[in-house]
Image (spheres, grey):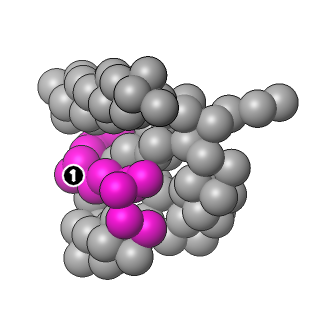
Amino acid sequence: MDITNASAIVTGGAGGLGEQTVRRLVAAGAKVVIADLASEKAESLAEELGSSAEFVETDATSEADVLRAQMARDLAGIAMRRLTSLK
């Protein structure tokens, strides 16, 4: 499956399995929102991965937090589509 230019949210994306999922998605060409409460680790990971990853502090049990993460994901997807259409 080709996920180039897709956008995703990974809850718990700052460590362990979540971090590895973020890394694999970015390596495959996706834009990823790292949704986690571990802000220091998540910010570091997002900085390392550059423009393909964004950290949004998210408590996955909070509807408002999840909606913010979804908005970030949607905006990342829009940005990727615009950049792709400029080629």
Q: Please give left or right for residue 29 compared with residue 68 in the image.
A: right
Tell me residue 35's x, y (percent): 35, 48
33 versus 13 height, above or below: above
| Residue 42 lies in the magenta stretch | no
Tell me residue 16's x, y (percent): 59, 70
Count of number-bearing discs: 1
Would you call the spot at circle 1 few (<14 residues within 10 Å), some (14-19), or many (20 or more)? many
Residue ID at (45%, 45%):
32
Give the magenta range. Answer: 49-60
- From this viewpoint, which residue is outermost toward the front? 87
The reply to whether residue 62 is in sight is no
Instruction: Residue under label 1, please give it.
Output: 57
Tell me residue 41's x, y (percent): 34, 76
Q: Please give left or right for residue 39 compared with residue 33 in the image.
A: left
72 versus 27 height, above or below: above
3 versus 78 height, above or below: below
| Residue 59 lies in the magenta stretch | yes
Q: Please give left or right for residue 25 compared with residue 87 in the image.
A: right
Quarter placement of the N terminus: top right
Residue ID at (44%, 68%):
49
Residue ID at (55%, 30%):
6
